[in-house]
Image (cartoon, helix red, strand yellow):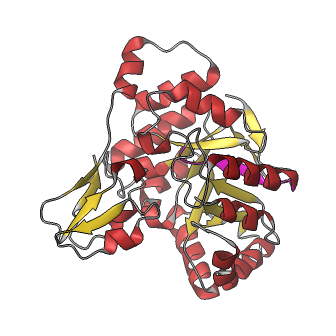
Amino acid sequence: MQRVRLGLKGPDVSEICFGSLAISPLQGRVSEKQGQEILRYAVTKGIDWVDTAEIYENYNQLNPVLKDHPELKVVTKSYSVTSEELFNSLEKARKQLDREIIDIFLLHEQESHLTLKGHAQAWNALLEAKAKGLVKYIGISTHAIQGVKAGALQPGLDIIHPLINYQGLGIIDGSLKGMLEAIGFASELGIGMYAMKVFGGGHLARHPERALKFIRSIPGVQAMALGMSSIQEVDFNLALISGKEVTEELRNSIIHRERKLYIADWCQGCGNCVRTCPQKALYLKDGHACLHGEGCILCGYCGRSCPHFCLKIV
């Protein structure tokens, strides 16, 4: 697998980052131990960084793998607003991941300059943490065009993790063209970028070659995070990225593996999931949560907000 550099000043990493949301309790596709074995296998295949977040609740799952592979770089994210919240999130990551230094720390899901303004205390705390050597690189993740633009102008920002795929699925404030223009703007400023939702939450999984080729064709994007919840998925994605032949058996096992958001009959209609969904893909009808299927990108954030455990990706 080829190695890349994130922006002008970012770290050298493998082109593929292991997206650990797919093995986390938030999505619940695999057990904790199974997830660890999938990540271990990915490491043997050349993947040398892993993407997580405080919301994924999988630091303890990742810890044993990180202990065995100290060379693995870690990205994590936090929704922190205040300085105190940010330092608490950082200390939680350092303690539970057993890392003195977090390689990359991002503010999670920033939507615009207004969002970043509202998180100014947290950002200043990140700058302080970087100055103290507690984190190496800082930045944001975003599903928004305006988030990319604002992030590119944020003082001290190193890395942006933008949502991007060939159909523009999941972009919350405009078109694919607008996102590409924003990425181009950030790239000109030397910002490091690695893509998320390359397969559109599974909606584009039937055309994986096209999905990967598109990301690799964007000059401002150096790498991509891919969520993988089986060893077969690791083999499949790495074969595609390396231009190797994929057997029909392997292809069929991956492409025809359907995933969807399941909403249980015992839903109480509290509306927490509707308010949480960044894609506005959920709504209430007759006291029950319902789904606009075309809007869901299978992020699983709704499930975490449900007090009755009604939502799950299956």
Residue positioned 81% across, 54% down in the render: 185
> Quick one: 123 or 113, which is closer to the camera?
113
Marks counted in the figure total 0
Residue positioned 40% across, 12% down in the render: 248
Residue positioned 50% across, 39% down in the render: 199
Query: For residue 58: magenta?
Result: no
Give above or below for 38 relative to 94.
above
* Quadrant of the rendered image containing residue 121: bottom right
Percent position of residue 272, x then y? 32, 74
Q: Is residue 248 visible?
A: yes
> Quick one: 96 or 242, which is closer to the camera?
242
Residue positioned 69% across, 82% down in the render: 120
Looking at the image, residue 127 sits to the left or right of residue 44; the answer is right
Q: Which residues are magenta?
A: 189-197
* Quadrant of the rendered image containing residue 129: bottom right
Percent position of residue 70, x then y? 62, 49
Question: Which quadrant holds the N terminus?
Answer: top right
Q: Is residue 103 visible?
A: no
Give above or below for 26 relative to 225.
below
Percent position of residue 171, x then y? 56, 54
